Amino acid sequence: MYSSKNTAAFHNHSSNVFVNAFSGGLDQVETRSKSGAEWALWEFTKDKIAPLREIMDEFTRPLMEKALADRERQMSGKGDSEVKQPESVLAHLVTQTQGVFLPATYSCKFGLNDTYRPASD
């Protein structure tokens, strides 16, 4: 009702862009789940989640890179001697994970089924 009174600056604000992409991705996941195994036929010519995932990646990539760099510094002994609390859930996951991490995190965003396999010990 009042959303038409919002300015373009409001609609184009990064938080709204993020929320719209996330919400749109969830809507597409719901549509896929209702379609069952045939969902790929409905998206034969174009993946409807990929553009939304790109928007999400723009936001999460810098956070992931920072969290991974912090973890690497801490593990190599070049970081602060005192242990800091992770700044985000993503940073916490990085401290608790070894091996391939990026594909799994991206998969979690929209419940995608990537070929994620944890590193073998």
Image (cartoon, grey):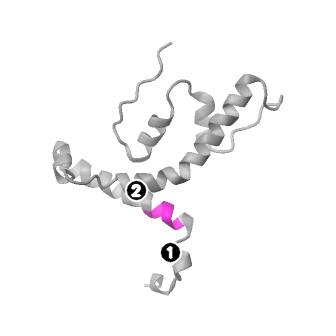
| Quarter that holds the N terminus | bottom left
Q: Check disc 2 and report its element: helix, strand or loop.
A: helix
Q: Check disc 1 and report its element: helix, strand or loop.
A: helix
Q: Is residue 49 above or below residue 17?
A: above
The Cα atoms of the two marked residues, 2 and 1, are separated by: 16 Å
Residue at the location (53% across, 83% down)?
Answer: 7
Residue to which mark 2 is pinned:
52
At which x and y percent is residue 114? 36, 35
Residue to which mark 1 is pinned:
11
Question: Is residue 9 part of the magenta span, yes or no?
Answer: no
Q: Amino acid at mark 1?
A: His
**Most common secondary structure along the magenta stretch:** helix
Residue at the location (51% across, 67% down)?
Answer: 16
User: On the image, which quarter does residue 106 sit in?
Assistant: top left
Q: Which residues are magenta?
A: 16-20
Residue at the location (58% across, 42% down)?
Answer: 64
At which x and y percent is residue 27? 33, 58
